[in-house]
Image: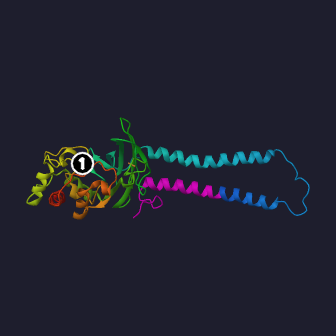
Amino acid sequence: MPQNTLAPAGEVARDILSLFRLIFWMAVVVFVVVQGLLVYAIFRFRRKPGDTAMPAQVHGNTPLEVAWTIAPAVILAVIAVPTIGTIGKLAEPPDGKPVVQVSVTGHQWWWEFQLPELGVLTANELHIPVGSRVNATLKSADIIHSFWVPRLSGKSDLFPGSRTTSRWFDADQPGEYQGQCAEFCGASHAHMKFRVIAQTQADFDAWVRAQKAPAATPTGRAADGAALFTNPSKLCYTCHTIDGTTAQGKVGPNLTHFASRGTLAAGLFERTDENIATWLRDPLAVKPGSKMPNLGLSDTDIQTLVTYLQALK
Ligand code: CUA
Protein backbone atom coordinates (compact mmCIF):
# COMPACT_ATOMS: atom_id res chain seq x y z
CA MET A 1 0.00 0.00 0.00
CA PRO A 2 1.58 3.30 -1.04
CA GLN A 3 2.10 6.24 1.30
CA ASN A 4 -1.22 8.03 1.14
CA THR A 5 -2.60 10.59 3.55
CA LEU A 6 -6.01 10.11 1.89
CA ALA A 7 -6.18 6.48 3.11
CA PRO A 8 -5.83 6.91 6.87
CA ALA A 9 -5.44 3.81 9.03
CA GLY A 10 -5.36 5.40 12.47
CA GLU A 11 -7.09 8.01 14.60
CA VAL A 12 -4.51 10.77 14.14
CA ALA A 13 -4.35 10.34 10.36
CA ARG A 14 -8.17 10.44 10.24
CA ASP A 15 -8.31 13.65 12.28
CA ILE A 16 -5.78 15.25 9.98
CA LEU A 17 -7.70 14.09 6.89
CA SER A 18 -10.98 15.50 8.20
CA LEU A 19 -9.30 18.89 8.68
CA PHE A 20 -7.88 18.64 5.18
CA ARG A 21 -11.32 17.84 3.74
CA LEU A 22 -12.95 20.80 5.53
CA ILE A 23 -10.30 23.23 4.30
CA PHE A 24 -10.24 21.70 0.81
CA TRP A 25 -13.98 22.08 0.25
CA MET A 26 -14.06 25.59 1.67
CA ALA A 27 -11.21 26.47 -0.67
CA VAL A 28 -13.17 24.97 -3.58
CA VAL A 29 -16.17 27.17 -2.74
CA VAL A 30 -13.97 30.29 -2.47
CA PHE A 31 -12.28 29.41 -5.76
CA VAL A 32 -15.56 28.91 -7.62
CA VAL A 33 -17.11 32.12 -6.23
CA VAL A 34 -14.05 34.29 -6.89
CA GLN A 35 -13.36 32.89 -10.35
CA GLY A 36 -17.09 33.05 -11.18
CA LEU A 37 -17.22 36.74 -10.27
CA LEU A 38 -14.05 37.36 -12.24
CA VAL A 39 -15.36 35.67 -15.37
CA TYR A 40 -18.71 37.48 -14.96
CA ALA A 41 -16.95 40.86 -14.68
CA ILE A 42 -14.77 40.17 -17.71
CA PHE A 43 -17.77 39.49 -19.93
CA ARG A 44 -20.29 41.87 -18.41
CA PHE A 45 -18.00 44.90 -18.42
CA ARG A 46 -15.91 44.23 -21.50
CA ARG A 47 -15.53 46.89 -24.14
CA LYS A 48 -18.26 46.49 -26.75
CA PRO A 49 -18.29 47.87 -30.32
CA GLY A 50 -19.45 51.42 -30.24
CA ASP A 51 -18.30 52.10 -26.68
CA THR A 52 -16.57 55.43 -26.80
CA ALA A 53 -17.18 57.03 -23.43
CA MET A 54 -15.12 56.26 -20.32
CA PRO A 55 -16.85 53.77 -18.04
CA ALA A 56 -18.44 55.18 -14.88
CA GLN A 57 -15.68 55.86 -12.32
CA VAL A 58 -16.57 54.62 -8.80
CA HIS A 59 -14.69 54.83 -5.56
CA GLY A 60 -15.55 52.81 -2.48
CA ASN A 61 -18.59 50.70 -1.71
CA THR A 62 -19.21 50.36 2.01
CA PRO A 63 -21.59 47.36 1.96
CA LEU A 64 -19.26 45.42 -0.37
CA GLU A 65 -16.19 46.22 1.72
CA VAL A 66 -17.94 45.19 4.92
CA ALA A 67 -19.04 41.95 3.23
CA TRP A 68 -15.59 40.98 1.97
CA THR A 69 -14.07 41.70 5.34
CA ILE A 70 -16.61 39.68 7.28
CA ALA A 71 -16.74 36.70 4.87
CA PRO A 72 -13.02 35.78 5.19
CA ALA A 73 -13.19 36.33 8.96
CA VAL A 74 -16.07 33.86 9.18
CA ILE A 75 -14.26 31.37 6.92
CA LEU A 76 -11.08 31.60 9.01
CA ALA A 77 -13.06 31.17 12.23
CA VAL A 78 -14.75 28.05 10.86
CA ILE A 79 -11.30 26.65 10.00
CA ALA A 80 -9.65 27.78 13.24
CA VAL A 81 -12.03 26.11 15.68
CA PRO A 82 -11.52 22.48 14.57
CA THR A 83 -7.84 23.14 13.77
CA ILE A 84 -7.06 24.36 17.28
CA GLY A 85 -9.13 21.51 18.73
CA THR A 86 -7.17 18.95 16.70
CA ILE A 87 -3.79 20.49 17.56
CA GLY A 88 -4.74 20.23 21.23
CA LYS A 89 -5.86 16.62 20.86
CA LEU A 90 -2.70 15.61 19.03
CA ALA A 91 -0.46 17.19 21.66
CA GLU A 92 -0.56 14.12 23.87
CA PRO A 93 -2.28 10.73 23.73
CA PRO A 94 -5.82 10.88 25.10
CA ASP A 95 -6.79 8.54 27.93
CA GLY A 96 -8.61 5.31 27.29
CA LYS A 97 -5.99 3.10 25.67
CA PRO A 98 -2.65 1.76 26.86
CA VAL A 99 0.37 3.76 25.73
CA VAL A 100 3.60 2.36 24.31
CA GLN A 101 6.61 4.66 24.61
CA VAL A 102 8.97 4.82 21.65
CA SER A 103 12.18 6.82 21.30
CA VAL A 104 12.98 7.63 17.70
CA THR A 105 16.43 8.79 16.66
CA GLY A 106 17.08 9.96 13.12
CA HIS A 107 20.48 9.29 11.58
CA GLN A 108 21.93 9.99 8.15
CA TRP A 109 20.26 7.85 6.72
CA TRP A 110 18.40 5.41 8.88
CA TRP A 111 16.04 5.23 11.83
CA GLU A 112 16.70 3.97 15.31
CA PHE A 113 13.68 2.82 17.36
CA GLN A 114 13.92 2.15 21.05
CA LEU A 115 11.06 0.89 23.23
CA PRO A 116 12.58 1.87 26.59
CA GLU A 117 9.91 0.32 28.81
CA LEU A 118 10.24 -3.00 26.97
CA GLY A 119 14.02 -2.99 26.61
CA VAL A 120 13.97 -3.23 22.81
CA LEU A 121 16.33 -1.48 20.39
CA THR A 122 15.89 -1.88 16.65
CA ALA A 123 16.26 -0.06 13.36
CA ASN A 124 14.09 0.95 10.43
CA GLU A 125 11.14 -1.26 11.40
CA LEU A 126 8.96 -0.13 14.26
CA HIS A 127 6.58 -2.75 15.60
CA ILE A 128 3.51 -1.47 17.45
CA PRO A 129 0.50 -3.22 18.97
CA VAL A 130 -2.96 -2.48 17.57
CA GLY A 131 -5.20 -1.21 20.35
CA SER A 132 -2.47 0.87 22.00
CA ARG A 133 -1.38 4.39 21.35
CA VAL A 134 2.24 4.98 20.48
CA ASN A 135 3.82 7.96 22.19
CA ALA A 136 6.97 8.79 20.26
CA THR A 137 9.76 11.05 21.49
CA LEU A 138 11.95 12.15 18.63
CA LYS A 139 15.50 13.45 18.33
CA SER A 140 18.31 13.42 15.80
CA ALA A 141 21.90 12.19 16.04
CA ASP A 142 23.14 14.58 13.36
CA ILE A 143 20.97 17.02 11.40
CA ILE A 144 17.25 17.75 11.11
CA HIS A 145 15.07 14.90 9.82
CA SER A 146 11.30 14.52 9.80
CA PHE A 147 9.27 11.48 10.85
CA TRP A 148 6.27 10.82 8.65
CA VAL A 149 3.95 7.82 8.26
CA PRO A 150 1.29 9.21 5.91
CA ARG A 151 -1.38 6.61 6.73
CA LEU A 152 -0.87 6.88 10.50
CA SER A 153 0.52 10.23 11.54
CA GLY A 154 1.51 13.72 10.50
CA LYS A 155 5.09 14.94 10.33
CA SER A 156 7.39 15.67 13.27
CA ASP A 157 10.83 17.15 12.89
CA LEU A 158 13.77 15.56 14.69
CA PHE A 159 16.41 17.97 15.96
CA PRO A 160 19.99 17.39 17.02
CA GLY A 161 21.02 18.48 20.50
CA SER A 162 18.91 18.37 23.63
CA ARG A 163 15.61 19.41 22.08
CA THR A 164 13.11 16.59 21.62
CA THR A 165 9.75 16.61 19.89
CA SER A 166 6.89 14.21 20.44
CA ARG A 167 3.84 12.88 18.73
CA TRP A 168 1.37 10.07 19.22
CA PHE A 169 -0.40 7.86 16.72
CA ASP A 170 -2.08 4.49 16.49
CA ALA A 171 -3.14 1.93 13.90
CA ASP A 172 -6.63 0.45 13.54
CA GLN A 173 -5.61 -2.80 11.89
CA PRO A 174 -2.55 -5.02 11.78
CA GLY A 175 -0.51 -4.20 8.71
CA GLU A 176 2.59 -2.60 7.34
CA TYR A 177 2.71 1.14 6.96
CA GLN A 178 5.43 2.90 5.01
CA GLY A 179 7.25 5.86 6.52
CA GLN A 180 9.66 8.33 5.04
CA CYS A 181 11.96 11.11 6.17
CA ALA A 182 10.18 14.31 5.14
CA GLU A 183 12.93 16.88 5.66
CA PHE A 184 15.76 17.14 3.17
CA CYS A 185 18.81 15.79 4.98
CA GLY A 186 21.44 15.12 2.33
CA ALA A 187 22.37 12.67 -0.38
CA SER A 188 20.21 9.74 0.72
CA HIS A 189 17.24 11.68 2.10
CA ALA A 190 14.98 9.96 -0.43
CA HIS A 191 16.29 6.58 0.76
CA MET A 192 15.61 7.29 4.44
CA LYS A 193 12.59 5.05 4.68
CA PHE A 194 11.12 2.98 7.47
CA ARG A 195 8.13 0.79 8.20
CA VAL A 196 5.63 0.72 11.00
CA ILE A 197 4.44 -2.84 11.50
CA ALA A 198 1.19 -2.93 13.46
CA GLN A 199 0.47 -6.30 15.09
CA THR A 200 -2.07 -7.90 17.36
CA GLN A 201 -1.06 -7.68 21.02
CA ALA A 202 -0.09 -11.39 21.02
CA ASP A 203 2.11 -11.05 17.92
CA PHE A 204 3.65 -7.88 19.31
CA ASP A 205 4.44 -9.56 22.64
CA ALA A 206 6.08 -12.44 20.76
CA TRP A 207 8.13 -9.97 18.75
CA VAL A 208 9.27 -8.19 21.93
CA ARG A 209 10.31 -11.54 23.46
CA ALA A 210 12.29 -12.43 20.35
CA GLN A 211 14.00 -9.02 20.29
CA LYS A 212 15.02 -9.37 23.94
CA ALA A 213 16.47 -12.81 23.44
CA PRO A 214 20.25 -13.01 23.06
CA ALA A 215 21.68 -13.08 19.56
CA ALA A 216 21.55 -16.48 17.90
CA THR A 217 24.69 -18.56 18.42
CA PRO A 218 26.22 -19.00 14.98
CA THR A 219 27.30 -22.40 13.73
CA GLY A 220 29.15 -23.60 10.63
CA ARG A 221 29.64 -20.91 8.02
CA ALA A 222 27.70 -18.42 10.17
CA ALA A 223 30.35 -18.85 12.87
CA ASP A 224 33.01 -17.95 10.30
CA GLY A 225 30.93 -14.88 9.51
CA ALA A 226 30.79 -13.94 13.19
CA ALA A 227 34.57 -14.13 13.35
CA LEU A 228 34.86 -11.93 10.24
CA PHE A 229 32.42 -9.44 11.73
CA THR A 230 34.67 -8.78 14.70
CA ASN A 231 37.93 -9.15 12.75
CA PRO A 232 39.97 -5.92 12.98
CA SER A 233 40.71 -6.09 9.27
CA LYS A 234 37.00 -5.93 8.36
CA LEU A 235 35.81 -3.18 10.70
CA CYS A 236 32.09 -4.20 10.83
CA TYR A 237 32.22 -4.17 14.64
CA THR A 238 33.44 -0.57 14.80
CA CYS A 239 30.03 0.70 13.67
CA HIS A 240 27.51 -2.03 14.54
CA THR A 241 26.46 -3.75 17.73
CA ILE A 242 25.58 -7.42 18.02
CA ASP A 243 24.69 -8.09 21.64
CA GLY A 244 26.80 -10.71 23.34
CA THR A 245 29.76 -10.16 21.00
CA THR A 246 32.67 -7.73 20.95
CA ALA A 247 30.84 -5.80 18.23
CA GLN A 248 29.57 -2.76 20.14
CA GLY A 249 29.74 0.06 17.57
CA LYS A 250 26.95 2.63 17.75
CA VAL A 251 27.35 4.41 14.41
CA GLY A 252 25.11 2.13 12.37
CA PRO A 253 22.01 0.07 13.15
CA ASN A 254 22.09 -2.57 15.90
CA LEU A 255 22.19 -5.91 14.08
CA THR A 256 21.51 -8.28 17.01
CA HIS A 257 18.26 -9.43 15.38
CA PHE A 258 18.99 -8.30 11.84
CA ALA A 259 17.24 -11.31 10.29
CA SER A 260 14.00 -10.54 12.13
CA ARG A 261 13.62 -7.50 9.91
CA GLY A 262 12.08 -7.64 6.45
CA THR A 263 14.34 -5.04 4.91
CA LEU A 264 17.81 -3.56 5.08
CA ALA A 265 19.48 -0.22 4.39
CA ALA A 266 16.63 1.88 5.85
CA GLY A 267 13.92 -0.02 4.05
CA LEU A 268 15.62 0.29 0.69
CA PHE A 269 15.73 -3.46 -0.07
CA GLU A 270 14.02 -6.68 0.88
CA ARG A 271 16.28 -8.73 3.10
CA THR A 272 17.43 -11.35 0.58
CA ASP A 273 20.88 -12.95 0.35
CA GLU A 274 21.41 -11.25 -2.98
CA ASN A 275 20.46 -7.78 -1.72
CA ILE A 276 22.64 -8.09 1.37
CA ALA A 277 25.55 -9.14 -0.85
CA THR A 278 24.97 -6.16 -3.18
CA TRP A 279 24.89 -3.89 -0.16
CA LEU A 280 28.09 -5.28 1.36
CA ARG A 281 29.91 -5.16 -1.97
CA ASP A 282 29.50 -1.40 -2.32
CA PRO A 283 27.02 0.43 -0.10
CA LEU A 284 27.68 3.77 -1.77
CA ALA A 285 26.69 2.42 -5.15
CA VAL A 286 23.13 1.74 -3.97
CA LYS A 287 22.74 4.41 -1.28
CA PRO A 288 24.55 7.62 -2.20
CA GLY A 289 26.50 9.20 0.65
CA SER A 290 26.04 6.14 2.86
CA LYS A 291 28.18 6.32 5.99
CA MET A 292 28.97 2.65 5.47
CA PRO A 293 32.12 2.57 3.36
CA ASN A 294 33.10 0.10 0.71
CA LEU A 295 35.14 -2.32 2.81
CA GLY A 296 36.69 -4.04 -0.18
CA LEU A 297 35.27 -7.42 0.85
CA SER A 298 35.99 -10.45 -1.31
CA ASP A 299 33.05 -12.43 -2.68
CA THR A 300 33.86 -15.24 -0.24
CA ASP A 301 33.86 -12.82 2.71
CA ILE A 302 30.58 -11.37 1.51
CA GLN A 303 28.90 -14.78 1.26
CA THR A 304 30.21 -15.72 4.71
CA LEU A 305 28.91 -12.49 6.24
CA VAL A 306 25.55 -12.93 4.48
CA THR A 307 25.20 -16.37 6.06
CA TYR A 308 25.96 -14.94 9.50
CA LEU A 309 23.64 -11.94 9.15
CA GLN A 310 20.81 -14.14 7.89
CA ALA A 311 21.24 -16.34 10.97
CA LEU A 312 20.65 -13.40 13.34
CA LYS A 313 16.97 -14.12 13.77
CU1 CUA B 1 16.42 12.33 7.03
CU2 CUA B 1 15.58 13.43 5.08
Q: Which residues are magenta?
A: 1-29
Residue 242 percent location from the top left of the image? 17, 49
Q: Nearer the viewer, residue 231 or 107?
A: 231
What residue is pinned by disc 1? 120
Q: Residue placed at 67% from the left, 48% from the top?
A: 72
Q: Is residue 245 left or right of residue 107?
A: left
Q: Nearer the viewer, residue 293 or 57?
A: 293
Q: Amino acid at mark 1?
A: Val
Residue 18 in magenta stretch: yes
Residue 223 percent location from the top left of the image? 10, 56
Q: Residue placed at 42% from the left, 52% from the top?
A: 153
Q: Nearer the viewer, residue 199 or 51?
A: 51
Residue 23 in magenta stretch: yes
Residue 297 percent location from the top left of the image? 19, 55
Q: Residues within 10 Å of mark 1 (few under 14, many from 20)?
A: some
Q: How is the image coloured?
A: rainbow
Q: Quadrant of residue 26?
A: bottom right
Label 1, secondary structure: give it.
Answer: strand
Quarter the N terminus occupies: bottom left
The majority secondary structure of the magenta stretch comes to helix
Q: Residue placed at 38% from the left, 42% from the top?
A: 143
Residue 48 percent location from the top left of the image? 86, 62
Q: Residue placed at 34% from the left, 53% from the top?
A: 288
